[in-house]
Amino acid sequence: MPNATVIDHPLVQHKLTLMREKDRSTASFRLLLREISLLLAYEVTRDLPVELVDIETPVAPMRAPKLAGKKLVFASILRAGNGLVDGMLDLVPSARVAHVGLYRDHETLQPVRYFFKAPAELCDRLVIVVDPMLATGNSAVDAVQELKDAGAKDLRFLCLLAAPEGIARFEAVHPEVPVYTAAIDEKLNEHGYIVPGLGDAGDRLYGTK
Ligand code: URA
């Protein structure tokens, strides 16, 4: 998986294991997703450029690093993406947010578009597209395509769990977009669920069926 980075920090792995447990409550799952999103966001932004600026501390003047370069956009693939974006905004409150509404047709497993709203000047921003699950890859591929069509040029894709099939499909269509994930699981089942996975991320996050 040349384009995929596995974020194998012990805290990430621990929280992910708790999230996978089938009897975990909705409230606990939601809290864990929020906590883990901070750690994932930390890793996906690790190489952002900084520049030295002149400031004064209460003790002395100094040149200190500040974020430089492109402004950030977090693009949430609705609805489960919101569970990651909420925590990421705690870390980068100045980030803009795009929403890409896609649902998976349960028969065909193909994404169906129903909503798209993104900040202006996407071409000048770093767009981090988020969805907890990279399963077939169909939704991720389509969401990134919509963002590219709206002008985005510099993109990263962040998820919690990926299937090898999803990564392969994503890389085949968007080879220049790096993928970050906390784990790559074994496979997809015949319903397009990640195995062993954690079930339906949106249902577990919002307590729906
Ligand atoms: N979407 C989910 O929420 N879970 C999966 O296992 C696959 C896609």
Image (cartoon, rainbow, N blue to C red):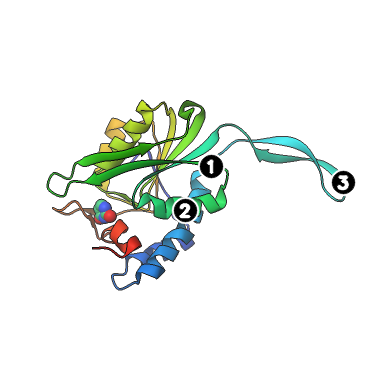
From the image, tell me which residue sits under label 2: 86
User: Are discs 2 and 3 less than 8 Å apart at CB?
Assistant: no
Residue at image position (26%, 48%) is: 135
Local packing at callout 2 (Cα closer than 10 Å; few below 14, some 14-19, many 20+) is: some
Relative horizontal placement of residue 59, taking residue 142 as reference (left or right): right
Q: Nearer the viewer, residue 85 or 39?
A: 85
Residue at image position (48%, 61%) is: 35
Relative horizontal placement of residue 14, taking residue 124 as reference (left or right): left
x, y (%) of residue 29? Answer: 38, 66
Q: Quadrant of ligand 1?
A: bottom left
Question: Which amino acid, mark 3?
Answer: Ala
Cα separation between marks 1 and 2: 11 Å
From the image, tell me which residue sits under label 1: 95
Local packing at callout 3 (Cα closer than 10 Å; few below 14, some 14-19, many 20+) is: few
Instruction: Identify the secondary structure beneath mark 3.
Output: loop
Q: Earlier in the sequence, mark 1 or mark 2?
A: 2
x, y (%) of residue 124? Answer: 51, 27
x, y (%) of residue 36? Answer: 46, 58
Q: Earlier in the sequence, mark 2 or mark 3?
A: 3
The mark closer to the camera, 2 or 3, is 2
Cα separation between marks 3 and 1: 31 Å
User: Residue 13's quadrant in the figure?
Assistant: bottom left
User: Are discs 3 and 1 less than 8 Å apart at CB?
Assistant: no
Question: Quick one: quadrant of the N terminus?
Answer: top left
Pointer 2 residue Cβ closer than 8 Å to ligand 1: no
Question: Which amino acid, mark 1?
Answer: Ala
From the image, tell me which residue sits under label 3: 60
x, y (%) of residue 68? Answer: 63, 34
Q: Nearer the viewer, residue 6 or 108?
A: 108
Question: Which amino acid, mark 2?
Answer: Asp
